[in-house]
Amino acid sequence: MRFKFLVSSVLAFGLASGAHAGLINGDFEDGLNGWEAYDDVAENGGVAIIGDNAAYGASTLFQASNTGAGVVNFEFDFLADISDDISSSHFSDFFASSLYFTDDISTFDLFGGYDDVQWMFDVDAYGEIVYEGSVTDSAVGTGWRHFSFEFVSSYDYVVTVFDIFDINGNVDSTFQIDNVSLSAVIASVPEPSSLVLFLSLLGFAGLVRVRALNTK
C-alpha cells in the first residue's frame, strides 16, 4: 500500500493533470470538417475562403473547442482581399475575428447563447485594427499575415469565430484562412532541479518496493 501511494505521488508530480480537446482540422486539409459554416464559405487547396455573398449580410465560419479554464493559445494565418468600394455610409466590407466563451456548449448560440465574447481584430478597406494579440507577416506567402494571442480563459469552451460583413452590397471581398490553432497551453517540462527531485522520488519508490519484496 505504501508503495502504491509513493508511485501515485511520483506520477502526480511528474505528469500534467487534465487533458482538453483543442481545435481540429485547423489546416483545412479535410475540407471544412469540424467547422460550422454559414453562407459564402468554402475550402480550396487546404485553405478556408470566406466571401461576402451572404444572404443576411454576413458569412461565418466557427468551431467550439473544449480548452478548459487556464492559459490558451490562439493563432492563424490569413490573406485579406477587402474591397475598396465604399458605400454611401463611408463604410466598407470588413472581416472580424472573435472568440466566444461558454461553460455550456449545448446552449451556445452566436446570437446570445454565450457567457462572454472578445473581438481579436478586424480588417476593412482602411487596414487592420487589432484589439487583442498581435499581427505580423506570415511565412505562408506574399501578402499573408499571422495573428497570435495567448490569454487566460475562465470558461470550459472557447469558440473561434470568423466573419465577413457585406456592407457595400457587392460580391467583391474575400478572406482566406489557414493554420488555425486554439488549444490549452501545456505546462512546461520541469526545471533541472525539479527533474532531479522527480528522479530521486522514483528511485526511492523502487527501493521501497525491493525492500518490501525482500521482507516477504
Image (spheres, rainbow, N blue to C red):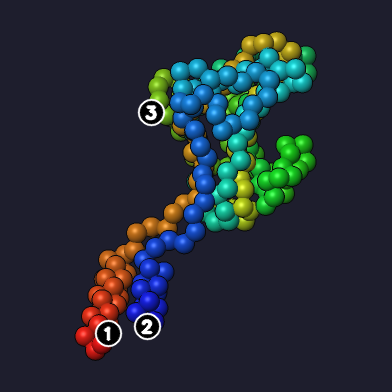
Left or right: where 102 falls relative to 188: right
Three-letter amino acid code of the residue under disc 2: Arg
**Residue labelled with disc 2:** 2
Residue 170 lies in quadrant: top right
Which residue is pictured at 56% across the width and 33% down the height? 34
Which residue is pictured at 51% across the width and 37% down the height? 24
Marks 1 & 3, CB-CB < 8 Å contact: no
Which residue is pictured at 71% across the width and 18% down the height? 54
Upstream in sequence: badge 1 or badge 3: 3
Three-letter amino acid code of the residue under disc 1: Ala
The span from disc 1 to disc 3 (Cα, nearest Å) is 58 Å
Image vertical order of residue 212 relative to residue 71, above or below: below
Check disc 1 and report its element: helix, strand or loop.
Answer: helix
The percent coordinates of residue 69 (x first, y second) are 58, 56
Q: In this view of the protein, which residue sits in the foreground, 192 or 93? A: 192
Marks 1 & 2, CB-CB < 8 Å contact: yes
Upstream in sequence: badge 1 or badge 2: 2
Upstream in sequence: badge 3 or badge 2: 2
Residue depth check, mark 1 versus mark 2: number of the one nearer the observer: 1
Crowding at mark 3 (Cα within 10 Å: few <14, some 14-19, many 20+): few
Q: Which mark is residue 194?
A: none
Image vertical order of residue 114 relative to residue 52, above or below: below
**Residue labelled with disc 3:** 139
**Residue labelled with disc 1:** 212
The percent coordinates of residue 134 (x first, y second) are 51, 39
Three-letter amino acid code of the residue under disc 3: Ala
Q: In this view of the protein, which residue sits in the foreground, 19 or 79? A: 19
The span from disc 1 to disc 2 (Cα, nearest Å) is 10 Å
Crowding at mark 2 (Cα within 10 Å: few <14, some 14-19, many 20+): few
Image vertical order of residue 215 relative to residue 173, above or below: below
